[in-house]
Image: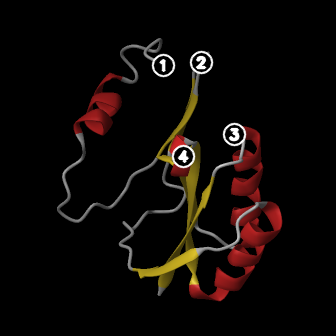
């Protein structure tokens, strides 16, 4: 079982969020993201969310308490679905503006999105695309 751990912060800068991302990943989170929110008294704030395996819940919560000004966190059980990948079956391509790693994904009857298809078809035709 995975857990979604969240807290709202209204006194945090972007630099602190970046630092917090690294600390949460080090504590065991598999995904971390932030969402801008409107707090009480119309203050701008940020919702910090971390997707965490059961074994790392305490470590991630301890990190949030230690590294932020929060007094509490919310914890929700979640399920997730992950596509299979073939390890190291990618192609590394380097241009002046970007280094991209293209991987083959096994997408059991899932259609590739338009943007991925466009990138695959046009990447080599227009190297200045990025």
Task: Where is residue 67? Give x, y as percent.
Answer: 80, 62
Specify whether residue 100 is in view.
yes
Marks 2 and 1: in contact by CB < 8 Å?
yes
Q: Specify which label sits upstream in the sequence, 2 or 3.
A: 3
Marks 4 and 3: in contact by CB < 8 Å?
no
**Apparent side of residue 13 relative to residue 51 in the rendered image (left or right):** right
CA–CA distance in space, label 1 to label 2: 7 Å
Q: Residue furthest right?
A: 66
Q: Specify which label sits upstream in the sequence, 4 or 1.
A: 4
CA–CA distance in space, label 2 to label 3: 25 Å
CA–CA distance in space, label 2 to label 4: 43 Å
Q: Which residue is mark 2?
A: 97
For mark 1, does the 10 Å Cα neighbourhood hold few (<14), some (14 to 19), or many (20 or more) residues? few
Q: Based on the displayed image, in which of its 4 quarters is residue 86 positioned?
A: bottom left
In what element is the residue under mark 4? helix
Q: Specify which label sits upstream in the sequence, 1 or 3.
A: 3
For mark 4, does the 10 Å Cα neighbourhood hold few (<14), some (14 to 19), or many (20 or more) residues? few
Task: Where is residue 19? Give x, y as percent.
Answer: 77, 50
Q: Which mark is residue 14?
A: 3
Specify whether residue 35 is in view.
no
Q: Which residue is mark 1?
A: 130
Closest to the camera, between mark 4 and mark 1, is 4
Q: Which residue is mark 4?
A: 41
The residue at the point 76 percent across, 71 percent down is 65
Q: Which mark is residue 25?
A: none
């Amino acid at each position: 079982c995975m857990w979604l751990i969240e807290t709202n912060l209204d006194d945090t800068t972007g630099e602190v969020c970046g630092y917090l991302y690294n600390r949460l990943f080090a504590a065991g989170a598999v995904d971390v993201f932030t969402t801008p929110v409107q707090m009480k008294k119309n203050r701008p704030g940020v919702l910090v969310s971390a997707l965490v395996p059961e074994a790392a819940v305490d470590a991630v919560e301890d990190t949030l308490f230690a590294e932020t000004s929060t007094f509490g966190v919310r914890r929700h059980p979640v399920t997730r679905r992950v596509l299979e990948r073939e390890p190291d079956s990618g192609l590394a391509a380097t241009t002046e503006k970007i280094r991209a790693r293209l991987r083959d994904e096994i997408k059991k009857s899932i259609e590739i999105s338009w943007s991925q298809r466009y990138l695959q078809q046009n990447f080599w035709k227009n190297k200045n695309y990025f």
